Amino acid sequence: MSDAEDKAVPIGGGHAVPTRESQDEKAEILVQEEEILDLFKPLPPLEGVLDEPNPLTFRAVIVGILLGSLVNASNVYLGLKTGFTFGASMMGAIFGFGAVKILQKVAPGIPFVGLEHFGPQENSIIQAAATGAGGMSGLFVAALPAMYQLHLMSENPKDDFKRILTLTLVCSTFGLFFAVPLRKFFIVNVARELRLIFPSPTATAVAIRSMHAVGTGAAEAMKKIKALGIAFAVALIQRVASYYAIGILYDWHIFTWFFIWGNYNNWALNIENWGWMIEWTPAFIGSGMLVGINTGVSMFLGSFFAWGFLGPILVHYNICIGKKLLPDDPKWDGYVSFYSLSNIGKEGWVPSPRYWFLWPGVMVLICYSMAEFFVHWKVLYYGLKYAWHSSAAGINEFIAKRRQGNGVAFLEKQGRGKLDEDNLVEDFATPDQQVPTLLWTIGVVIVVVATCIIGELQFDMNAGLAILASIFAVIFAFLSIHGAGVTDITPLTASAKASQLVFGGITTGQGLSVTDAQTVNLIAGGIASGGADMSCSLVSDFRVGFLLRTPPKLQFFAQAVGTLVAMFLAPGIFVLFMAAYPCVINPDDYDHCAFSAPSVSAWRAVAEAVTNPNVPIPLSSGIFAIVLGVVAIGQVILKRMVLFGDREKYRIWLPNWMAIGVAFVIPQTVYSTATLTGALIAHFWVKRWPANFDRYCFAIAAGLIAGEGLGGVVGAALQLGGVSGDVYGTQIACPADSC
C-alpha cells in the first residue's frame, strides 16, 4: 500500500518500495554500475548467455505463483496491521532465481523442471507470475472490511464468498487487460518525454541481469538469496513462537515493567496507557529499511504528536476520555484504553482520542493526496492527446483501405501528430510478440459489462455508476503509473478518496438511503482503486520485461495465470483472517484488536462523512483537521512551485504528510517506532558500507517482511485450530497478564 510523496507510506492498497533520495540519483547509480547510457531502451544483451526461444516455462509460472501467493498472504496480514502492502516483483526475481537454480541441481535431467537453460527472460516470467499472484490484497485491507464494519454485508464473510469472488474478478481482470495498452503508452510512447524511469522495476531488471551475468553474477545472486532466506526463516520462526510468549518475544511493555517494579504505584502506567512500548516486528523494521529516513522520522513524529503530546492534553481538559480496563482491580485501576470506538453519537458520549484523531488523519490523507493528484494534470493531458491521435490514425487507416489508399486529410494530419519523433522509444517487440489488440479490447469490454451486471445484481449499483467506476479506474491508473514511473510512488490513496468523494456527491443527488449510498461509495471506490492498483503493478512488470527484451505476450500470459490464482487466494485468506480475528470487522465489540486496520478506518470514515449528514465529528477535531489539511496543501504548493531546480534538494527536509496522517489513524505507536528503527539502520548502513548495503539491504528487508507475513497467516490458522498462544501460551511480562 504507496502515495504521492518522495518517500511515502502506503495505505489502502498502495506499495512500499525501496527508494533513494531522488529518481535521478537512482538512475545515476544504475548507469554507473551497468554502464547503461540510455535507460529508455532495453538493456544490452549479456555476453555468453544463451538465447531463450521460449522463456514462458512451466517451472517459471509455478515458482512465480508460489512466491506471489506468499506475498499475497503476507500483504493481507501486513495491510490489516498498518495499511502497508508490498510488491512481489523484486522478491519474485531474487527468490525465483534461487528456486530454479536449486531445481536444476536436484533434478537436472527432468524435463520442465531442471533440464532447460535458465536465463534472464525466464527470470522475468517468474516475477511476472509472482506480480499477478501477489496482487489484489489492497481490496481486502481497505474497502471490503469497511463494508463489514458498516454492516453492509453479511455478518460472516464466509457467507459472502461468492460476492467477494466476483468483486475480486472485476478488479483483477480489469487491471490485467487494461495494462496492455498502458504498456505501450507509458513505456514506449511517452517514457522519454515524461522522464519515466520506473526506479524499482528498473532496479529489478538490472538485478536479474546481474544475477545471470557470466562470472561473478551467480555467486553474488546466491549471497542475496542466502541473506533473504535467513531473514525470512528468522522472521517466520520469531513471529510464530511469539504467539506463545508475546510479552517476551514480541511486545516489550517496558513502562509496565517499571510500574510493577515500583510496587504498582508510579507514573509509568500512564505512558503504557498511550501505547508506548517496543514491538519486535520484523516486517516493519524491514519496511523502515525500504521507505527511507524521511518517512520513518515523519511517521514517528506524527505518533509522538498524537499519542505523546496532544492526546494527553485532550484527556487532561476532558475533551476526550479513556475507558478503564480493570476498574475492580486495585493494582490496575489506572490501566486505561484510549482507543474505544463504541457508543459513538449516543447521549452523553465523549470521544476517545482514537476517534478524535481519526478525522485529522483522514483529512491530511485526503488533502495532501488530492493536491498531488491535481498537480499531475499533465499526464492526463498526454493520455487524452495520445488517445485522440491514435484514434485518428486508426480511423484514417480503416478509411484508406476502403478507398484504395485515399484517406481523410484531417485525420491523416492528426494521426501523424501522435508521437514526438525526438522522444520516440523503439519497442523491441515484433507484432507477433505483442498481446493481440483483439484480445485485450474484448477483455476490457467483457470486464466492463461484467462490472455492470455484478454491480446491479449483487450490490444494487446501477450500470451508469459501474461504468463511471471503470472510467475512474482508467484515470487513476494513468496517475498511479505516472507516479510509479517518476517517483516510485503510486498515489492510490488519492485515487480512493477522490472516487469516494465523487460517488458521495452523486448518491446524495440521487436521494439514496444512507445504507445504499455507503454500499455504492465503497464498492465503486474499491473497483476504481483496485483496477488502478492492478494496472499499475502489471505495467511496472512490463517495464522489467521491456528492459530484458521479454516478449510482452508471454509476460501477459504469466500475469494472467498469476491473476487467476490471486482471484481465489486473496478472498480465501481474507475469510481466514476474519474468522480468526472478528474484531477487524466488529471493532465496536472489542476494546483491543490485534489488527488496527488504519486503511479500513479511513475508508469507513470518508464513506460515513459523504453519505451520512449526522456523523458526530467533534468540533475541535473538525477545526484541527481543516487547519492540518490547509497546511498539507500548502506544502504541496511549496514543493511544486518553489522547491524545484536548484532548490529541489531542500525537499528532503519537508515532512511526509502521508506518514503523519497514517500515524494519526493508527492508534498504536509501535509501528512508527519499528519503521524509524529500520530507517535508521538503513541510513547508517548505507553511510558506512554502501556496497554491502546495495548487495543485501533489499534482500534482508524482503525476507523480514515476507517471513512475518507468513507467520501471521500461520497464527490465524493456529487461532482457528484452537491451539494458539491464547490457549497454550504465556502472558508473562504483559500489563495485567494480557497482551
Image (spheres, rainbow, N blue to C red):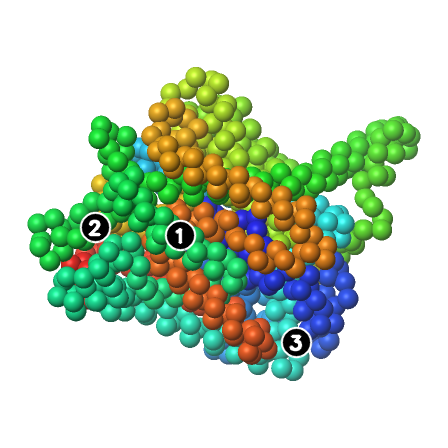
The reply to whether callout 2 and callout 3 are in contact (CB within 8 Å) is no
Residue on which the image places disc 2? 336
* Residue 419: % across, % down: 81, 44
Going from the N terminus, do you reach mark 1 or mark 3 first? 3
Q: CA distance from mark 1 to mark 3?
A: 50 Å
Amino acid, disc 1: Phe
Q: Residue at x 84, y 34 (%)?
A: 414
* Residue 377: % across, % down: 67, 39
In the displayed structure, 45 sits above or below 438; it is below
Q: Nearer the viewer, residue 613 or 723?
A: 613
Q: Nearer the viewer, residue 502 or 205?
A: 502
Q: Residue at x 54, y 49 (%)?
A: 3
Residue on which the image places disc 1? 305
Q: Mark 2 Cα within 10 Å, few/some/many (few <14, many 20+)?
A: some
**Secondary structure category for the residue under label 2:** strand
**Secondary structure category for the residue under label 3:** loop
* Residue 698 visible somewhere in the drawing: yes
Going from the N terminus, do you reach mark 2 or mark 3 first? 3
Residue 568 relative to residue 342: left or right? right
Q: Residue at x 40, y 63 (%)?
A: 674
Q: CA distance from mark 1 to mark 2?
A: 19 Å
In the displayed structure, 693 sits above or below 657; it is below
**Secondary structure category for the residue under label 1:** helix
* Residue 434: % across, % down: 70, 50
Location of the C terminus (image quadrant): bottom left
Going from the N terminus, do you reach mark 1 or mark 2 first? 1
Residue on which the image places disc 3? 213
The reply to whether callout 1 and callout 3 are in contact (CB within 8 Å) is no
Amino acid, disc 3: Ala
